[in-house]
Image (cartoon, rainbow, N blue to C red):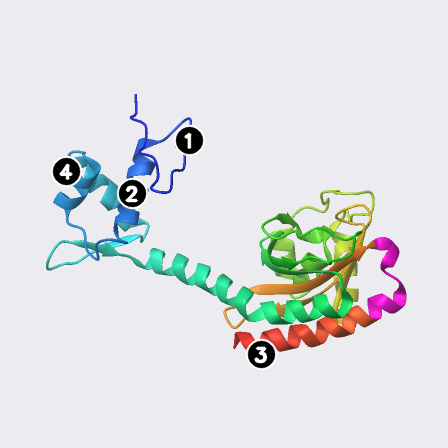
């Protein structure tokens, strides 16, 4: 029977069904925050395990690129995989920080909820949001993920993909229905994306949530990641004139954010 993992320094409660080997590997990675290099004896003593166990853990971390071993000292150092993860996290934080003033301006101009999202395969990860101050408003989706094909944010970003890449992500014709208005076939999605490319923005009318309408414009970062900025409001407030005005503002905002990402 595996021993329960130690509680985290911030007081988090361990899971009910811990996996000791995974916990030990993660603890070794966290140790790099305190030590630039870890010897096998350091790892063994820190974890309270045999040297052979510590060696197996480090060997697996090395195999996956999370650590590397210095040929001369035989000590272990942070590997490229850790740097890649850290870079990705910092890049996301940087995108939010750079886009935030523009999101605030859009929120002030229309007094509607504004979102910043990123495309992750077939999902939209909502990175940031500023809610409308109106009594009836769309709630923030920051921290949530939704299927890309049912949101304006997702469709704006999917419109940047070529046909081969879209089919790779959506190999099946049938798509998940979230509401009665969700696009439920790949063919219909492709038609919608063609319209999105032609007019320069995507829209959604109660496709991801009843009573919610939105408009979004996509951006591509220098690193090849896709983002989109979105304005959402109750569907009763989304008139054709409002949609046009919002789209123009979002196109300008997306251009501005893109220049900040260079």
Element marked by disc 1: loop
Residue on which the image places disc 3: 259
| Quarter of the image where one finds residue 6 | top left
Query: Which residue, as the protein is rendered here, is positioned at the far top?
Result: 1
Residue on which the image places disc 2: 27
- Say which label, 2 or 1, has the lower sequence index: 1
Question: Which mark is nearer the camera, 3 or 1?
Answer: 1
Would residue 162 be visible to someone looking at this image?
no
Element marked by disc 3: helix
How many numbered circles are shown? 4
- Mark 1 Cα shell of 10 Å, populated few (<14), some (14-19), many (≥20): few
Q: CA distance from mark 4 to mark 1?
A: 26 Å
- Mark 4 Cα shell of 10 Å, populated few (<14), some (14-19), many (≥20): some
Residue in the image at 68% along x and 71% along y: 105
- Mark 3 Cα shell of 10 Å, populated few (<14), some (14-19), many (≥20): few
Range shown magenta: 235-244
| Quarter of the image where one finds residue 8 | top left
Element marked by disc 2: helix
Residues at discs 3 and 2 in contact (Cβ within 8 Å): no
- Say which label, 3 or 2, has the lower sequence index: 2
Residue on which the image places disc 4: 51
Residue on which the image places disc 1: 15
Query: Which residue, as the protein is rendered here, is positioned at the far left?
Result: 72
Image location (x, y in percent) of residue 225: 55, 64
């Amino acid at each position: 029977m595996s021993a329960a993992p130690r509680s985290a320094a911030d007081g988090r409660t361990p899971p009910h069904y811990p996996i000791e080997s995974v916990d030990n590997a993660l603890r070794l990675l966290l140790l790099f925050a305190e030590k630039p290099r870890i010897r096998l004896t350091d790892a063994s003593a820190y974890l309270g395990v045999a040297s052979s166990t510590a060696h197996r853990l480090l060997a697996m971390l090395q195999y996956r690129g999370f650590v590397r071993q210095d040929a001369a000292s035989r000590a272990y150092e942070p590997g490229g995989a850790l740097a890649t993860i850290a870079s990705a996290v910092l890049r996301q934080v940087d995108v939010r920080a750079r886009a935030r003033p523009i999101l605030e301006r859009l929120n002030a101009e229309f007094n509607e909820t504004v979102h910043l999202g990123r495309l992750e395969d077939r999902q939209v990860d909502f990175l940031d949001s500023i809610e409308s101050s109106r009594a009836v408003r769309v709630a923030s989706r920051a921290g949530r993920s939704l299927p890309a094909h049912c949101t304006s944010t997702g469709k704006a970003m999917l419109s940047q993909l070529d046909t081969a890449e879209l089919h790779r992500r959506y190999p099946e014709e049938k798509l998940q229905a979230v509401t009665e208005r969700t696009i439920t076939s790949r063919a219909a999605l492709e038609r919608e994306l063609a319209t999105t490319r032609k007019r320069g923005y995507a829209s959604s009318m109660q496709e991801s949530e009843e009573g919610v309408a939105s408009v979004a414009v996509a951006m591509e970062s220098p690193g090849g990641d896709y983002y989109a900025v979105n304005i959402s409001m109750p569907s009763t407030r989304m008139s054709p004139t409002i949609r046009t005005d919002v789209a123009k503002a979002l196109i300008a905002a997306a251009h501005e954010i893109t220049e900040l990402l260079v």
